[in-house]
Every structure is written in C-alpha cells, then in structure tokens.
Amino acid sequence: MYKILDELAKRREKARLGGGQERIDAQHKRGKLTARERIDLLLDADSFEEYDMFVEHDCNEFGMGDKKIPGDGVVTGWGTVNGRPIYIFAKDFTVFGGSLSKAHSKKINKVQDMALRNGVPIIGILDAGGARIQEGVDALGGYAEVFQRNVLASGVIPQITIIMGPCAGGDVYSPALTDFIFMVRGTSYMFVTGPDVVKTVTNEEVTAEILGGAKVHTTKSSVADGAYDNDVEALTDLRRLIDFLPLSNKAGVPVRKSHDAPTRMEMSLDTLVPQNPNLPYDIKEAIYKVADEGEFFEIQKDFAGNIVVGFGRMEGRTVGFVANQPMVLAGVLDSDSSRKAARFIRFCDCFDIPIITFVDVPGFLPGTAQEYGGLIKHGAKLLFAYAEATVPKITIITRKAYGGAYDVMASKHLRGDVNYAWPTAEIAVMGAKGAVEIIFRQSAGNEKEIEKQTKKYEARFLNPFVAAERGYIDDVIQPHNTRARITRALTILRGKQLENPWKKHDNIPL
Ligand code: HXC
C-alpha cells in the first residue's frame, strides 16, 4: 500500500512540474507566473480540486511519441472564490507552449461541460501558442469542440478569460467567444497570426506589442475589457469581478450584506451638474456616490470613454451601471460607445442584472467618419439591446437627453421601468441653438431675433417638465435623493415579470 502511495505522490510531483524547472524559471524570468501559481492566487486557499492531471497526448508524429508530459499543457478543475464555486482551466506554457492537442482539448471540454451542467461560471487563463502543430487536424477539431461549448454556454454561465502570455490562433478565438477578456501589460499578446506570419504574408514588420499587446486591445480594438500591470494584480481584481456575477442565468444576482444605508442622501449631487450647460462634469461621481460603499467595477475603461459601463451594488445586490460621460466628447454616442454599451447591457440582461442608466447625451456624433463606419448599425445595437432587455431598467436623466439618443438611452418608450429626471434635465429634439437655426432659417443673420427665439426655445423645451407632463418621466427628483429613489425602485421591481415573444433567437444588427 505504501509503495502505491509513494508512486502516486511521485506521479503527482512530476505532473506539477509541467515542462520542468528550467521552463518554470524561464516563465518567472519573463515576469509570468506558472499555471498552478495563477490558480492558487485566484482561488480560495486549498479549494482547488484538480482533474485529469495524468492525461497525456497520443500523438506519434514528429517524435512526439517520446515527449509526453502528464497534464499535457493545461491544468483543469474547480475551486471557490470567496466561497462561491468556479470551474477553471489554465494553460501551462512550460508544456509545448501551452499548445492545444486532442487530449488537451478534451480536458477543457470536460470542465466546460461540468460548468454548464452545474450552472457555475468558468474561467480560462491563457498563455499558449494555439493549435499543437504536430497534431494537425486533431488540434483544429479540438479547438472547434471548445468553441462549440463556448457558444452553447454563452448567456447561461459567465465565461471569463485572462490572457497571460502570447496567445495566437485558437487561443484568441475561444476568448473572443467569452463574456470578458483581461490582459497583462507587457507579457500578454493576442493575435490571429503572429508577427512572423504577418511579415511573410503582407511584408509588414510589426512587433508583438504593436500587433496585439494589452494597450492595442484595450484602447483600439476593444477586444479586451481591461489590462493590469502583472499577473498578481490581474488575478486579484478578477476575484473582485467574480463577486459581482451570478453563478448562472437562473441563479439570480449574488446578495451580500451592505453596510450602506439605502436612503443615504448625497448632498453634493445637487451641485454636480454645472450651471453652464456646456461645461463638463464627471458622471462617474454620480455612480460612486449612488452605489453601495462607492464600489464600482468598470468594464472597458480605456475604450470609448464617452460612455461608462460597469458593475456596482445597491442594497448588496449587483446592478449594471451605464452612463454617458460628459467629460469625453460631451458624452456623445458614436459607433464605439454604442457597441461597448450594447454588449454590456446584453450581458446584464442574460444574467438578470438590473440596469441603471444615467443620461447626459447631446445626440449621435455627426460626420462622414461615423456614417462610413456604420454608425447607423452600431447605434442600432444599443437601441436593440435596451429594447429587448427584460431586466429592471431604471433611468435618470441628469442633463441633456437630445434627439434619438433620448429614445435610445432606456427611455420609457423602450420599456424603461422607472424613469427619473433631475431638475437640470433638458429633454428635447436638439439643443436650442441648432433648433432655432433650423426653425428660423429665414431670420439667419438677425442676431436679435435668433437670440430671442433661442431663449424662448430654452424656456419651453430645455427642462424635464414637458416630458413629465406626458408621463414619459415618472418624477423629477432631487439629485441628493437619487440613491434612495433607485433602491426603492429596485425593491418594487424585484417581482418584475416580462417576457419577449417566443423566437429561436433575435437578429441583432451585428
Ligand atoms: C507546438 C509549440 C507551439 C505550437 C509554441 N510551441 N507554439 N509547440 N505547437 N503551436 C512550443 C515551441 O516549440 C517551444 O518548444 C515552446 O512551445 C515555447 O515556444 P517559443 O517559441 O520558444 O516561445 P516564445 O518565443 O515566447 O513564442 C511564443 C509564440 C510562438 C509567439 C506563441 O511559439 C509561436 O508563434 N508559436 C506558434 C503560433 C501559431 O502559429 N500557432 C498556430 C495557430 S493556428 P521548446 O521545446 O523549444 O521549448 C491555430 C489553429 C486554430 O491555432 C484556429 C482556430 C480558428
């Protein structure tokens, strides 16, 4: 018996070493942790249950028959984060560069299937060179098996990816099918084809950083949702994000004890909006001051800053915040901000997370660049996302709600449940100047007349009361009471029941 136990211990030790000490040292030298160190940091202490640590590949091509390493380049299993379960797979770059073989893909498939069956989120930690080249079509098929499961799990359980090394080929497509992607600055890259292939095919010389580094994907492509300076910071913050997320689409939002009074008044909100309507202010201040304990987990904070999205809590329950940001491009809606917010709203709707929207938007951004870039289609994504969402939707117009953007931003007409306005709200087809220039075109050049009509337009339309008189706004509220009004609305909306007509699926303008 003892001999067998010794044998087991030896086998485990070998598997834990992955590609060997030399490769582990090389990993550390590059500023990266190993797959197992990453899992240890992400999960609660001693909570990891590992599966398939003795799995090996069965490829004999190109001398692979002699190169078998237990685990085959991916560590899989489940554990807990602050007591709540998650499934996990972490690619081990020290074993064949974390590349995916048939055996490796089956290990991932197993935890994907279990996560879906048991209604538990799944986290992938990627540091890998794509398909195991020696395995050919077996590796390609293996990826497709992972992709298929990613798609079936989409909207059923949260799927999150952290990119912690150079990722290519299939190791970027699977992440792209998940809900959130995070990267590490300086050590992680994502590209379909790496710099060498780019040079061969297009003759373009480009570094990995410029082709697919964290900066590119969080500021330009918007493929990634956030970036961190190192592995430890990324994993620690991921624990924070997991705390906000429901386990599945049937589990409801997590509830934690809140020490923040639901009726807390925030007098400074009364002066947040400047008297001059053309001056900016930081809408994040409203979010921080309304959310429980001022906690806000922002998604895509380095991309399309004219809209702010992220998670917070109200009375201990997760909510999604969406807010136009007057500090960036006056909070205008453009293609990027529309896509960013639409995706976030759809995530919230999948997982029963109520949406709180702060509106201060001068409209959609005009111009050829936007129109040629498909503003109509991208703006429609946001409109579609709000209109199809059946979760509780609470809207607060803080200042401008002009034109189509008024309609789009969770208006009453798109089944907004509770729509409030601050007294500073201006709900109109457009700003006074633009409106008067169109209506009184014949008075062009007559400054006195234009000024008189502008003042008249401002007095008549640039307020919340025309909308309130029609019931499009449920109440004009005092800004300092915003938290209390939202928490009361959320309480009454907990029993909300709303279903869209049966359909196989919708056809959102992609
Ligand atoms: C087998 C691989 C491998 C792969 C890396 N290795 N990628 N082995 N298949 N795909 C091995 C290397 O041979 C090396 O082994 C070890 O992993 C470390 O790799 P290095 O190249 O030394 O590391 P580094 O310089 O950091 O470069 C990392 C890398 C590079 C950028 C990922 O290895 C690379 O470009 N790999 C190939 C990427 C790729 O084209 N993959 C196929 C994509 S197609 P030794 O023994 O020397 O340590 C694809 C199809 C699916 O994925 C598409 C679905 C849509």
Image: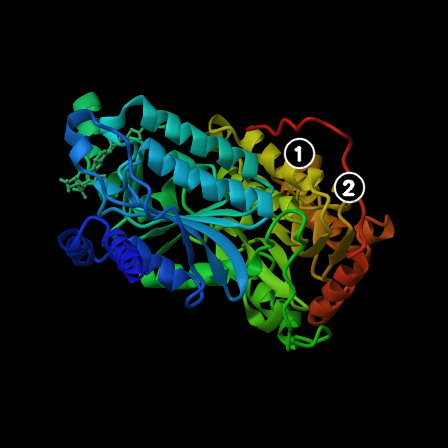
Residue identified by numbered label 1: 441
Choose top left, top right, bottom left or bottom right for residue 63: top left
Which SS class for mark 2? helix
Q: Name the residue under label 2.
A: 413
Type of amino acid under label 2: His
Q: Which of 349 and 30 is in front in this view?
A: 30
Write down the quadrant of residue 146 in the picture: top left
Question: Relative to 17, is 176 above or below?
Answer: above
Which quarter is ligand 1 in? top left
1 or 2: tag closer to the N-terminus: 2
Number of labelled discs? 2
Q: Where is residue 185 in the image (x, y as percent from the top left)?
A: 29, 53
Residue at 39% x, 31% y is 143
Residue depicted at x 66% and y 28%: 505
Q: Taking 81 as reference, is 20 above or below it?
A: above
Q: What element carries label 1?
A: helix
Neighbours of disc 1 within 10 Å: few (<14), some (14-19), many (20+): few
Left or right placement of residue 409 versus residue 279 in this view: right
Residue 175 visible: no
Query: Is label 2's Cβ within 8 Å of ligand 1?
Result: no
Give x and y (percent) for residue 58: 28, 31
Q: Which residue is pictured at 19% across the width and 32% down the height?
A: 65
Q: Is residue 199 above or below residue 457?
A: above
Give whichever of 103, 260 is nearer the camera: 103
- The disc labelled 1 sits on which kind of residue? Arg
Query: Which quadrant, please, contains the C terminus?
Result: top right
